[in-house]
Amino acid sequence: MSVRIEKTASVWTVILSRPQSRNAINAETATALYDAFNDFEQDDSASVAVLWGEGGAFSAGWDLKQAAALENDQFFESHNISKDGSEVPPALLGPTRLDLDKPVIAAVSGPAVAGGMELALWCDFRVMEKSAYFGVYCRRWGIPLIDGGTVRLPRLVGEGRAREIILTGRRIDADESLAIGLCEYLVEEGECREKAEALAHEIAAHPQICVRADRRSLKNQHGKPLREAMTYEWHNGREALFQEGVRGAGQFANPSEKD
């Protein structure tokens, strides 16, 4: 089994388990990842997910043995997005086209390169071990970024920095990743999963309607004019305010009252 799920309360840890291939993503693994995160999104008892690679590597990206066996475009037909966007099939790496309403944290050890970097960029934020690293290593083999890398990277680190990282294909170590905003936490060896899960439980302990509303507003404001973004924030947050915020304010004002 190339993907498995471990659950603790409302936190799911989705585990890539192809250590013999440095957790490279083949078709079977991509489908399993896609299904895992779809299940996570649809399960009302699940609040936050962690994505972690077993065996000392986050992911070496798309399985190049599979890529080398391609002979025509038939393989890609099932990966095409419909023109109107109504159908979102699995991407080559599985979940990277999914627009979840729940947060996912990447726990990164070892290499997260090529498509593995794209998987980590898909997550809300990243916890890296000190020896972990990113890199568009697919640059060496003529494989383009087609799972969100050219879209998400510049939004995190700026366009100029993203151009340099993508075009050179060089290695970005954990210290530099933290400095440029490519990761948010740096931890000792062997501690990324533990730290990511602790953060996941911290997030899961908050009222979830509000968490998801703020996350949704943050995500959807990108590229909007200020007035439009502020208007979206108000309408998006108003529902959460009345569903959770008023009750929470009441509990703050009257701490002795119980539901």
Image (spheres, rainbow, N blue to C red):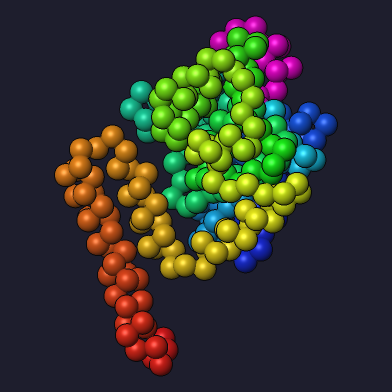
Q: Is residue 21 magenta?
A: no
33 above or below 104? Answer: above
Q: Residue at x 29, y 67 (%)?
A: 241
Q: Quadrant of residue 115?
A: top right
Q: Is residue 65 magenta?
A: yes
Q: Quadrant of residue 256?
A: bottom left
Q: Nearer the viewer, residue 97 or 191?
A: 191
123 above or below 255? Answer: above
Q: Nearer the viewer, residue 63 or 114?
A: 114
| Image coordinates for residue 24, horizontal then vertical, percent | 71, 29
Q: Quadrant of the C terminus?
A: bottom left
| Residue found at the far top of this picture | 71
Looking at the rendering, the stretch of residues picked out in magenta corresponds to: 61-75
Q: Nearer the viewer, residue 137 or 18?
A: 137
| Image coordinates for residue 180, horizontal then vertical, percent | 50, 35
Q: Residue at x 76, y 42 (%)?
A: 54
Q: Is residue 152 visible?
A: no
Q: Quadrant of the N terminus?
A: top right
| Image coordinates for residue 46, horizontal then vertical, percent | 55, 59
| Image coordinates for residue 158, horizontal then vertical, percent | 41, 29
> Horizontal placement of 189 versus 196: left or right?
right
> Horizontal placement of 147 versus 140: left or right?
left
| Residue found at the far right of this picture | 20
> Horizontal placement of 161 versus 237: left or right?
right
Q: Is residue 216 visible?
A: yes
Total marks placed: 0
| Residue found at the far left of this picture | 227
Q: Residue at x 69, y 56 (%)?
A: 194
Q: Residue at x 36, y 55 (%)?
A: 214
> Horizontal placement of 196 versus 103: left or right?
right
Q: Nearer the viewer, residue 255 or 190?
A: 190
136 above or below 228? Answer: above
